[in-house]
Amino acid sequence: MFALILVLIGLVLLVGGGQLLSLGGSPYYALAGVTVIASGVLVARGRRAGALLYGLLLLASLAWAIGEAGFAPWALAARLVAPAVLGLWFLVPWTARRLHPRPAGSALRRGTLAGVAIVASLIIGVLANQIFNEHRPDPMFQAGTQDEPGQRTLVSAGGGGDWTTWGGDAAGSRFSPLDQLTPANVGGLKPAWTFHFGPGPKGAPGALEGTPLKLGDTLYACSDYNDVVALDAETGRPRWRFRANVNLTGAAYGHCRGVAYYRVPGATGPCAQRLYTNTIDARLIALDLRSGRPCAGFGSNGYVDLKVGMSKAPAGYYYVTSAPTIARGRIVLGGWVQDGMYWGEPSGVIRAFDAVTGKMSWAFDVGRPDRRGEPKPGETYTPSTPNSWAPMSADDRLGLVYAPLGGAVPGYAGAQRRPFDEAWSGSVVALDAETGQPRWRFQTVHHDLWDYDVGSQPTLIDLPTPSGIRPALIQPTKRGEIFVLDRETGQPIRAVTERPVPQGGMAPGEHATPTQPFSDAMPSFRGIDIAERDMWGVTPLDQLWCRIKFRKARYEGTLTPPGFTPSIAYPGFLGGMDWGGVSIDRDRMLMIVNSNYVGNYAQLIPRAKADRLGVRPFGMGGSQKAEGQGIQAQFGTPFAVRSMPFLSLIYAPCQAPPWGRISAVDLRSGKLVWSHPLGTARDSGPLGVGSQIPFTIGTPNLGGSVATRGGLIFIAATQDKYLRAIDTMTGKVVWRGRLEHAGQATPMTYLSPASGRQFVVTSAGGHAFLGTSTGDAIVAFALPKKGH
C-alpha cells in the first residue's frame, strides 16, 4: 500500500513536473517524480534502497527549498512538510522490518553520515540562494526606513469622546484623541456587550461592514439591509430601531458601511439633529436622531429617490454603499454600480442634496459638465461613466469635497471609452461643495484595465514639510501606490514619476498607456514582482499546480495588461489598499497602512465564445455555470472576461504568504517605520476549513484601522476572528479579543459618559469574498469597571 502511494504521487509529480519543464519552469518536480516512483518500486520489492533513495530526495529537497526561498518558514513548509511526513512511514516497525534494517553496530555510522548530509544540504541551499536568486528590492523600502518616528507633537483632534463621522472626522483620519487605553493596560480589555441585529428579511445580504457613530450617550449603526439602530453606549441595549423595508431584488451585496450625522443650524425640536442613511434599493433617508422616525420635511416624507435621472437597468445595478458625506450643509453621494455586466450601465454621477429639505443642490456628471441639475425629461445622466463608490472626505474651510473615482464600466474593456471616461477614471477629484464645480483632479491609473478603481477614502492632514505646513491629501490605491497631494491644488507634494509599463499581449483593438504614475518618494505596497519560485501551496502538489498556472500566464511585472491568453494582475482587485483606507496618528505623524498581496488571474473571452457559454449580464438569465466561473459578460464590448483571485485547487492563494500586512510610515520623512504580517492561519485553510494553526501567516484583510492618542492601533479586518490592539511605536500585537465572526469592518472608539470608560467597538459580520462566515454582531470591549 505504501509503495503504491509513492508510485502514484511520483506519477503526479512526473507528469506535472514534465509539463512545468516544458513551459520553462523548474526541473525539480520532474526529477522528484522519477525519484519517488523509483523509491516506490524498490519498496514494493522489499529493498532498503527505497528508503535510502527517499532520504536522498529529502536532502536534495532541503537544499532546493533553501536555494529558492531562503529560510522563510511558510515557504519552506510548503516544500518540505508533506514530503517529510510521508517519509515518516519508512520508520514505522512493519515497514522497517520489511526493508531489512542494517545491523545495530552501524547506527553510529548512519547517524554521522546523516548529520553530514544535512549540513551539506543546508550549505548548498544557502549558496544557491545567494548565487542564483537575484536581489529583488521590495518597493516598500524604496523611500528608506526609520527606527522610530520624529518627536511627538500633541495636536487638537475633534470629536473628544465621540465618533461623529464614518472616518472619525471629515478628514477621514480615523484618529481618536482618547488615551485611557495604552499598551500598558490594554491587555485588560474584556467583552463589554454584544448586539445582534437578528435575522434580516428573506434574501438579505449576509454580512456586516458598518462602523457605528457615537453621539452623547448613544451609538448609531446600520445593518447591511439598512435598518438603523440606536444603542446605549454603556450597555449596548437598543433604544430604537428604524426598519428600512428595502426591496432586495437584485441586491447581491449590501454594505451599509455607516450613517451620517447633521445638526440643523439654529433648529430645535424633532429632526433638529438627524441621521442619513442610503439604501440598497437606492433611497436616501433622513431620520430624527432621538426617535428614529423619518423627517417629514425631507424629500417625500423623509425619503429621496436616488434612481431619478438614472438610465434604466435591472434592479440592484445601482445603489450607495458608503456613508453619506456632509459638507457645507449638503449631503454628497456617489454610488456603487454593478461592474462588468454591459456597456451602458447606470451613471457614476455624484450628487449633492440639501441636508434640510432633500432637494438636489447639484450634480457632477463627467459626460455633461455643463449640467448641474437633473436631466430634462427623456434624458438621463451619462451612462457608464466612472463612479465613486468609496467613502469621500471634506474640508469645510476650503469648501471642497474629495471623491475617489473608479473606472468606466465594464472595467476590463477599454476600446469603447470616451475621452471624458479616460480623463476622469481612476482619479481623486476635488469638487466645490456648494456648486459641484471640479477644482482639480489627479489620476492614479491611466486607462484602467485591471479594476484598479480608487476604493479608499482620501485622508486629509496638515503635513510638516521643509517649506512649512502644507494642506495635504493622502490617497491610497489598490495598486499599492500612495499619493501625497496638495489638497488645494492637486499637485504632488511627494514626487510622482511616470514610468514605462508592460504593453504586450492585448486583444485586438485594445491598448495600454505607455507609462503609469508611481509615487517614488513614498513606500509602495504593491509587493515585489513575483516569479515562479514565489508560488505557494499547502503541499508540493498544489504548489506545482500554481507553478504551471503561473508559467501559462503572461506576467511582465505590475500592470501587465489582460488579453486572450491568461495574465496575472498583482496586486489584484482587493489591493493594495481597499475601502478601509489608512489611519493617521496625528500626534506621532504616523500613517498606518493595512495592505493585501493576492494576485488576480484574468483572461479575455471573445464574444462568440462567451455567447456559446451562455454568458449574459447578472440578472438577465445568464448561465449559472458561467457566473460560477467568475465570468463577467461585458455586453456591448468585443469580449467577456474571467477574472478571479489567483488561488490553488484547494482555494489557497498561489503566492507565498504573507498575504496581508500592517505597516507604519513616518509622514514627515516618508520612510517606513515598521511592517509586520497581519493575521493567523487559525480560521482559514484549504477548502475554506479553518486550520486551527495559531501562528501568524498574514491573511488577506478587508476593513480599516483606528489610531489613538494612547499609542494603540485597533484593527480587525483579517480572516481570523480577532480584534487586535497594536503598539503604534513597534507594531507589536499587545492584545487580541476573540469575535464571533471575522471583523471585515473598521473599528471605532469612544468614551462612555455613564462610566467614564473608553470602549472599542467593531462589527463582526464576516465577508463572503474572503470566505469568512457571515454574522450580524456589533461587539464592544472595555476595561472592567473599578471594583469588578
Image: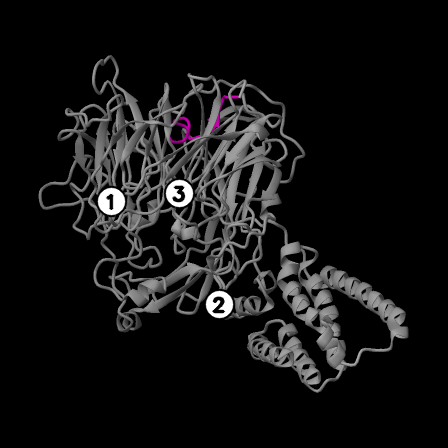
Give the residue type at disc 3: Gly
For the point 20% across and 23% down, the residue is 356
In the rendered view, tell whether residue 487 sits above or below residue 111.
above
The percent position of residue 599, horizontal first and vertical second, equals 48, 57
Badge 2 density bin: few <14, some 14–19, many ≥20, Cα 10 Å: some
Q: Spatial distance from mark 3 to mark 2, Cα to Cα?
A: 35 Å
Badge 3 density bin: few <14, some 14–19, many ≥20, Cα 10 Å: many
Give the residue type at disc 1: Pro
Could you tell which of marks 1 and 3 lies nearer the N-terminus?
Answer: 1
The percent position of residue 198, horizontal first and vertical second, equals 31, 40
Q: Is residue 408 left or right of residue 554?
A: left
For the residue labelled by badge 3, is the local secondary structure a helix, a strand or a loop? loop
Q: Spatial distance from mark 2 to mark 1, Cα to Cα?
A: 43 Å
The percent position of residue 66, horizontal first and vertical second, equals 71, 61
In the rendered view, tell whether residue 287 sits above or below residue 390.
above
Between label 3 and label 2, give the one nearer the viewer: 3
Q: In which quarter of the view is residue 64 placed?
A: bottom right
Read off the residue under disc 3: 765
Q: Is residue 163 magenta?
A: no
Could you tell which of marks 3 and 2 lies nearer the N-terminus?
Answer: 2
Q: Is residue 369 left or right of residue 693?
A: left
The percent position of residue 6, horizontal first and vertical second, equals 63, 78
Give the residue type at disc 2: Ala
Give the magenta part as a residue range: 165-179
Q: In which quarter of the view is residue 475 placed?
A: top left
Residue 472, can we see it?
no
For the residue labelled by badge 1, is the local secondary structure a helix, a strand or a loop? loop
Read off the residue under disc 1: 201
